[in-house]
Each structure stands twice: as structure tokens, then as C-alpha cells.
Image (cartoon, rainbow, N blue to C red):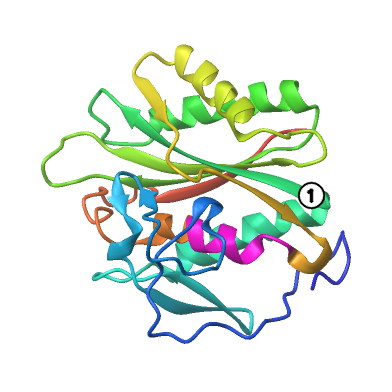
Amino acid sequence: MLTNAGSKSRLTSRKMQSTHLQYYGRSRFTPLYNPHYEQVIYNISALRFPLEDFLYQETLFKVMSFEHGISSSIMSAAIDQLLTALSHYSKILLVRFDLRVYTETPNNSLISKYRKTLLRFLDKKYQSKAWLFWVREQTPRSDKAHYHCFILLNGHKAKSGWGAFQQVQKACYMHPDTSAWLPESASYKIERNGLKGVESAIHRISYLAKHYSKELTPNKIKRFQTSTSRS
């Protein structure tokens, strides 16, 4: 549980599913197993990803398992940001999206500009603090990076993932070298009371922590970043 709204977040673990189970997915990534429903992540079936345990502050979470593993620093930072948002607001809306860029990306200057624009729009739209988390990836066949992202919003004011994504698209209009894509099962409602929705959201965003396709990031260039608006 969270000790209180203003202090360091701490979790109480639930009994977790056994590690050999493979996730077959459902809409919104609820922790139920249904072999008749095929969830899609970035156009890749979730059937490809078995589960593994990730230990965060004495709590085990089920995350996606990848051949090249996941980054503990990225996974921990993502959970940190989620819990920080929950310490500010008792209800949070999380929205996943992906950002493509159409110019060469030796550094992260483009997403840095985009980040400022997006957080400004979210701040104005919801009159509340907003958070952005991104990871940089690049495949060997491309000279351009792409970014997997999620935003965290005050769930008392932000009710629709599609409405939030419209702000994401609006920010793209201000930066023509970018475009955004909304994947399947992109939005999650999370509540501080009982940590409702936390496990499903953490499982979903664990895709961002995979090692694969981050190796081409140049030295001294950030592979991920967390940011917040001014409200």
C-alpha cells in the first residue's frame, strides 16, 4: 500500500502467478489468462512474451520476458514515476503511445523539444501535473530512432485515453518531423486505494524496459527519461 499521499511510495505484494505461465492477454491487460484472445503490442502478438518476475522494493511484479532481458534501471524508473504520480493524485490515467521521427537522430534533441510542447499542452488541458516517460530505441535497419512512451495524468480530470492522445497528436503538429501511434490497450485507470490497476499497468509498460533495440543508442545519449509539467 502507499503509506500516505506525500511520502515515499511503498508497496505490499499480492500472491503472484507462477513463473511458468505465459500471458495470453485481454483487453486492458487484466491479469487473466484467455487463450482465445490475442493481445497486440506494437503490432507484435503478446503470445510471444512469457512472464518473469521483477523485484521492486521487496514486491514481485509480473513483467514481460524477452530473449535479451530487461533493463532494471528503466523498469524501476518507470515504476517510480507511476508511484510518484499516485502520491499526487488518488486516481491516475496512464496512456501508452509510440513516437516516430523522420529525421536522423544522433541525439534526443527532437524529443526534448516535443516533450516540452506536449507537457505544456497537457498542463493547459487538464490544469494538473502531468508526467512523460520515454525510452529510445533503434533497429539495425534504420538510421532513425523511435520512442516508446507513456503519460500519467490526474485521473479525476482526465477520463479518456483517446482525449489525452489528441494532445499527443496536437504536439506532433507542432513538430512535423514526428508522428504518434496509439497501440492496442493503451490506457489504464489506476487508483491509490488498494493499488487498483497497478499490476496490469506495470505489466504493460514493462515492454519499454526490454534491452533489445537500445544497443544502437550512441554513448552518452540518454536511453530513457522522465519528465513532469509545472502544475
The residue lying furthest to the left in this view is 141
Residue 109's spot in the image, x, y percent?
Answer: 40, 30
Residue 117 in view of the camera: no
Amino acid type of the residue that numbered disc 1 sits on in the rendered structure = Lys
* Side of 65 relative to 87 (left or right): left
What is the magenta range?
196-204
Q: Is residue 80 left or right of residue 215?
A: right
If the image is split into quadrants, where does the N terminus sit? bottom right
* Residue 4 is one of the magenta-drawn residues: no
Judge whether residue 139 can be spotted in this image. Answer: yes
- Above or below for 16 versus 183: below
Residue 202 among those drawn in magenta: yes
The residue that disc 1 covers is: 91
Nearest to the observer: residue 80 or residue 107: 80
The residue sitting at 66% across, 23% down in the picture is 120
Q: Residue at x 55, y 58 (%)?
A: 78
Under circle 1, the secondary element is strand
State the residue at coordinates (25%, 59%).
212
Residue drawn at the location 61% of the way across and 66% of the way down: 199
Q: Quadrant of residue 47?
A: bottom left
